[in-house]
Image (cartoon, rainbow, N blue to C red):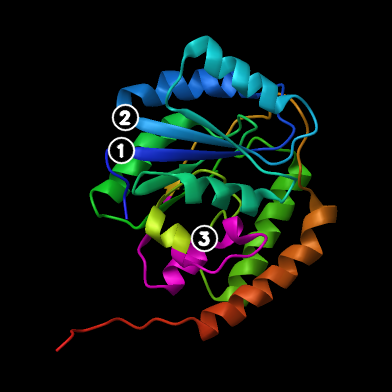
């Protein structure tokens, strides 16, 4: 249920050791999304070991930004947990996400949000057509998406893209597991939801270092694919027709 006086949409951004990016991120979010509000932004500190949290707090004080909510996890739990912690605390019926490394462009969000708010989609997920990453990361991602689609039977172009707009109730209904943020399109389709892919801008990382690579994703991602295939086969899809 949407909270009383809920904002038009909620933005959730998982933050882990992004101290050098949070100020620019918040400056951009404020400039780009304020005209499309009212909105709220939940930046979820996933147990950062740098001063990401302190810099977010300082920015909030300096700008008296009532729309900014800083959610702090007790310890590092991973990106899926950080995203879901923000979704659980969000007050809007539509929850959007961005990565915290400035590679996603918040200017893509308003059109994505509109598709969900007008009922043309249950979820809109980004596709980084002109991806600004290293050759190795681009090739490994293409292979990963191909393998993921072959195993799950789905058709997702860019499963790891961090920019999304999804009805909050669907975030809360799909099965939860580490890595689920990469399978949201597949899980929502598995529930009968309408998923739209949309080309989005992608930018080079401004500062800091990538948290994922081939070494820490390949085997884990393969295991997740088979788990999702099992979930899709066993998922409950009942609908109540009427009560007499």
Residue at the bottom extreme of this rendering:
244
What is the C-alpha distance between the residues marked 2 and 3?
25 Å
Highlighted range, magenta: 173-197
Query: Which sits earlier in the primary sequence, circle 2 or circle 3?
Result: 2
Q: Residue at x 59, y 19 (%)?
A: 24
List the residue tagged with mark 3: 184
Q: Nearer the viewer, residue 7 or 74?
A: 74
- Residue 121 figure quarter: bottom left
List the residue tagged with mark 2: 38
Contact between labelled residues 2 and 1, with CB atoms less than 8 Å apart? yes
Side of 3 relative to 69 (left or right): left
Q: Residue at x 61, y 52 (%)?
A: 160
At mark 3, the secondary structure is: helix
Residue 46: x percent and y percent? 69, 41
Q: Residue at x 71, y 21 (%)?
A: 20
List the residue tagged with mark 1: 8
Does the segment drawn in magenta span residue 191?
A: yes
For the question of whether residue 155 can be seen, the reply is no
Q: Residues within 10 Å of mark 3 (few under 14, many from 20)?
A: many
Query: Which sits earlier in the primary sequence, circle 1 or circle 2?
Result: 1
Is residue 27 placed above or below 101 in the rendered structure?
Answer: above
Does the segment drawn in magenta span residue 90?
A: no
């Amino acid at each position: 249920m949407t909270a009383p006086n809920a904002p038009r949409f909620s933005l959730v951004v998982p933050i882990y050791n992004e101290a050098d990016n949070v100020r620019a991120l918040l400056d951009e979010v404020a400039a780009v999304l304020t005209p499309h509000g009212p909105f709220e932004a939940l930046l979820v500190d996933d147990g950062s070991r740098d001063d990401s949290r302190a810099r977010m707090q300082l920015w909030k004080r300096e700008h008296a930004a009532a729309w900014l909510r800083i959610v702090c996890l007790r310890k590092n739990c991973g990106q899926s947990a950080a995203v879901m912690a923000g979704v659980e605390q969000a007050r809007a019926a539509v929850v959007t996400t961005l990565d915290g490394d400035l590679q996603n462009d918040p200017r893509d969000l308003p059109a994505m949000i509109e598709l969900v708010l007008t009922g043309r989609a249950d979820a809109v997920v980004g596709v980084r057509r002109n991806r600004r990453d290293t050759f190795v990361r681009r090739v490994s991602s293409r292979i990963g998406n191909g393998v993921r689609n072959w195993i799950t039977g789905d058709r997702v172009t860019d499963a790891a893209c961090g920019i999304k707009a999804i009805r909050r109730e669907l975030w809360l209904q799909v099965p939860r597991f580490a890595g689920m943020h990469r399978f949201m399109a597949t899980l929502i389709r598995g529930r009968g939801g309408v998923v739209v892919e949309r080309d989005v801008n992608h930018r080079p990382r401004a500062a800091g270092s990538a948290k994922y690579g081939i070494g820490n994703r390949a085997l884990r991602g393969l295991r997740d694919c088979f788990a999702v295939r099992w979930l899709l086969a066993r998922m409950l899809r009942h609908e109540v027709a009427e009560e007499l």
